[in-house]
Every structure is written in structure tokens, then in C-alpha cells.
Image: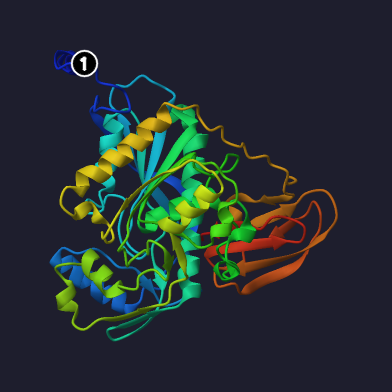
Amino acid sequence: MRKILLAVLAISFAHGFAAERYKDRLFDVDVQKDVVYASGVNHLSALSKLSTTLSALASANGGTMVYLYDNEEDMQPIDLHMDIYSPKGDSENKRPAVLVLHGGAFAAGAKDDMDQQSVTYCDSLAARGFVTAAVQYRLGITAKTENMYISIDSANFSRTVYRGIQDVRAALRYMRVNANNLGIDPDRIYLLGNSAGAVLSLENIYVDKASEIPAVAKENPQLGGLDEYGVKGSNSEANGVVALWGGIHDVSIIEGKATPVLLVHGTADSTVLFKTGRPLGNISATFENVMPSMFASAGSLTVDVKAPTLYGSFVIDSVLKAKGIEHETYFVEGMSHEFYDDGDYDVKVKEKVFGFLYGLTQKPAMASVRAVVLAKASRIRMGEGNLSFTLGSGKDAQYAVMDMRGRKVMQGIAAAGESVDLSGLNSGVYVLNVRGERPVRFGLSK
């Protein structure tokens, strides 16, 4: 690798310029697939019949899966993965990192989606010396479906976005906790989001407290708090964001944050509006875009989405200007959604993205606010195989065991220092609530 790098540098000098880390391609790239960044994450499990039908058509016609679910009560724990791209043979140990978040209207797409350019961005940036990660986040929206009719209300859509917000925060904490092993600087971790991924990226840097999440998004008690899943003990917010055609749910959450942002948007975008409005007004065209060759096979598909209002890049730019917060924009008159597919904008958008991220490497790092753990240690100790639990010294306390549908399957008084038998429960995943303690989610297998 050293010989290859020297050869590249020699050619660069011969042509009158010096190749530069983070600016020019210097490295081959190693990829570590399906790294688990969060385990036991509650996710929807009752896939609708229509989603199954569309998936079969997609498989036969080269399209992508669209995840629509029947309800939010049936859930199961899953692991969340990322693919990590690293510069091959690089010995630098304080490199900036970029997490790439794909689009797909929160119901489609994948971390290895070539059409959405996630792989292209990860590979290109890793070749320049960044460590990058293509991140899987929970997809799927609860919808009413009948024959070829789909209806989605704003409450279900809000909870879908909330799940994604939780996942991105968990992915960022994973990178920071493992910074030494990954050879990255925990104060230089950035997000690059496309469409739905751009929404999640912007929400990440501006939502910093639970009160900023719409109340309707937190109605499902199985979802938990902002940092419910993944590793703990580190900051959950990015040090900078590239938002390709994104928006946020409330401009007041911007407050006075000076996190570096690049906003890229077409002024004629009708999927995530450049100014303000409900996204996905052109939902049928969006589904046709993510399932191009098989859409006609689905027949007459009617989609009614009442997504929450989003404030697009124009509004975000206006607020940042009014607050005197430095940021960059690339707005293109008359362009629609994901315009990197139009003409030479593929190159132009990448130039803007790579230039912005390179610029961040030339500035002092934005120090991450380290998480301070103030909560008292839990008195709950699970027994072997989770067949029992013991409450540590102190007062006796009421307890209840809930299944994943929120039903109470066991309750009583736990005496301090004594074991409570859980072996009578069926195999499954449960939540143990003890008064005065943090809930404990556990699995039981017989």
C-alpha cells in the first residue's frame, strides 16, 4: 500500500499538484459488513398483505422492498447494522468519520442501495481518508391497506421518524464509544443524509431534548426515550451535517446551535418541499421511483399520505441567517427531488459535498459534549437465564412484568434482597417495571 500511495503522490507532483488527504482519492478501501451497532431494538413485525404483494412484485422486477405494517402493537427485537468503510493501510488514528443515511420515504431503501448512492459516497470518502459507515435504520410505516389502497396518517408517520431519530443517535454513540478501535476523532463525526436520511440528519443536530419530539410520536410506550437503544455514555449528536433535500418538523428546535450544515435542495422539490408543506405530496411518483420496473405490474395503486408538515431548506437557511449562524447552501432553481440524477448534477452535488466535508477537516474540531450519567445505579439484578430477578438493598417495591403488547402478565411486591421467580412466563421478550427504577427489557427462552 505504501508503494501505491507513493506512486500516486509522484504522479500528482508530476502533474503540478500535490494529492491531499480528505480532498483527493489516496487509498484503496476495506469494507466491514453488517457491524451490529444496537441490539434488542423494538421494531414492527406485522407486515401487511399489500406490502408482501408489492415485495413479491419487486423481487420479480428488480425493485426494492416497501415496508408497510398493520399495527404498532406487534413488535419484536432486532439488531441494527452498519457497513464500515476504512482507508486500506492507513495508519492515521484520529480521522474524521461520516455516517451515510439513505433515503426512501422511511418505507424503502437500504444501507447498500446503489441507486441512492450510499455506497458511492462511503467508498469515495473512505478513499480520501475518512472512515465512513452506511447505516441501517428501522424502516416501515403503519398503514391502513385494502386491495391496492394505502392510507397513512400523520401520527403513524411521526412515530416512524422518531424510530429513525433513535437509531441515528445510537449509531453516533457506537462510533464515539469505539473511536479508538476505529481510528477516528470522536469530535469529528458527521452525517450525510439523502431525503429521509437528510430529515434524520437535521433532526439529530437540532433535537436535543425529549420535549422537542412531537407528543404523538411518543405515544407508543414500547419505543422508549431518545437514547433507549444501543451503547450509553457518549454524546448522541453529530458535529456537522450534509442534508441533501431534507427538512425539519419545527424551526424552533434550531435555537442557537452553530453546528456546521450544508443544505442542498431543488426549488421545485415536491417530495420534501423546498419551503414548507406536507412531504410526499407526489407519493405515487415516489413509489414508482423506488420500484420503477415493477410499478406497472401492481396495477392501480392509490396512496393517501398525511405526513406531518416539514420545513425545508429555504426555511432552515432563513432561520440560520437570522441567527447569524454560519452554514452553506446549494440551491438549484427549478430542480426536483434527488436531482443528482439530472445531467451533470451528479458531479456538481458531489463536488459540493466533498468540498464541504474537506473544509470541516481544516477547521478546529467541535468538541462533543460528553454524556454525564446522573441516574442512580439500578437495584435490579437479573438471574441466570432471566428466570428470576433480585431487588438490592433498600425498601420493598411494587413490580409488574409487561409483554411486548403492553399487557401486564405478572405483578406483585418485590422484597429487598429476595429473588422473584419468573420461570412461569412463556418464552418471549418482556419489560420489568419496578417502582423507582429504570425499566429492564429482557428475553426469556425455555
Taking 225 as reference, is 72 above or below it?
Answer: below
Quarter placement of the N terminus:
top left
Q: Residue furthest right?
A: 395
Q: Nearer the viewer, residue 355 or 58?
A: 355
Which residue, given by chain and number where applicable, does mark 1 sit on? 9
Q: Nearer the viewer, residue 39 or 145?
A: 145
Is residue 42 at all visible to an observer of this figure?
A: no
Left or right of 302 in this view: 176: right
Q: Position of residue 417 (x, y in %)?
A: 79, 51
Q: Nearer the viewer, residue 168 or 17?
A: 17
Residue at image point 18% right, 82% down: 299
Taking 325 as reference, is 108 above or below it?
Answer: below
Q: Residue furthest bottom?
A: 147
Taking 386 as reference, is 54 above or below it?
Answer: below
Is residue 27 at all visible to an observer of this figure?
A: yes
Q: Position of residue 200 (x, y in %)?
A: 44, 55
Q: Position of residue 308 (x, y in %)?
A: 47, 71
Quadrant in the picture for residue 236: top right
